Image: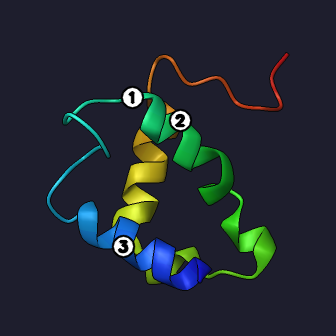
Amino acid sequence: MGREALAVMDDHLTQHDWFVADRYTIADIALFAYTHVAEDGGFTLSDYPNVCRWLNRVASHPSHIPITEE
């Protein structure tokens, strides 16, 4: 099921930079939470190049605060 979800995300990101409204929204924040650690769950993110580019966009967004930052 996880691979299917990543494939849907990757497909969506072929046409869009973000998940909703063509801008950074709570949808991106919510999806990033689990997606950025998907490799810890055994998923190979390099199989989903659009997801990888999106992860980098989210991480470099000025409003992004890494979970490890206090």
Horizontal relation, residue 42 to residue 6: left or right: right
Q: Horizontal and vertical percent for residue 54?
A: 39, 51
* Label 1: which secondary element: loop
The answer to which image quadrant residue 52 occupies is bottom left
- Quote the CA–CA distance across marks 1 and 3: 18 Å
Secondary structure of residue under mark 3: helix
Which residue lies at the image location 40% right of the left edge and 78% below the top edge? Answer: 7
- Is 5 situated above or below 16? below
Q: Is residue 12 left or right of residue 5?
A: left
Earlier sequence position, callout 2 versus callout 3: 3
Tally of numbered tags:
3
Mark 1 → mark 2, Cα distance in angstroms: 7 Å
Q: Quadrant of the N terminus?
A: bottom right
Q: The residue under label 2 is which amino acid type?
A: Ile
Q: Which mark is residue 25?
A: 1
Asked where in the image residue 11 lies, by quadrant, the reply is bottom left
The answer to whether the residue labelled 1 contacts the one labelled 3, judged by CB atoms less than 8 Å apart, is no
Distance from disc 2 to disc 3, alpha carbons, whole Å, reads 17 Å
Residue type, label 1 = Thr
Label 2 residue SS: helix
Q: Residue at x 55, y 74 (%)?
A: 45
Q: Quadrant of residue 69?
A: top right
Asked whether, in this view, residue 1 is left or right of residue 23, the answer is: right
- The amino acid at mark 3 is Val
Asked whether the residues under the numbered discs 1 and 2 touch, taking CB atoms below 8 Å apart as contact, a structural biologist would say yes
Color encoding of the figure: rainbow
Q: In this figure, which residue is indicated by the disc labeled 3?
A: 8
Q: Relative to the observer, which residue lies in front, 53 or 22?
A: 22
* Circle 2 residue: 29
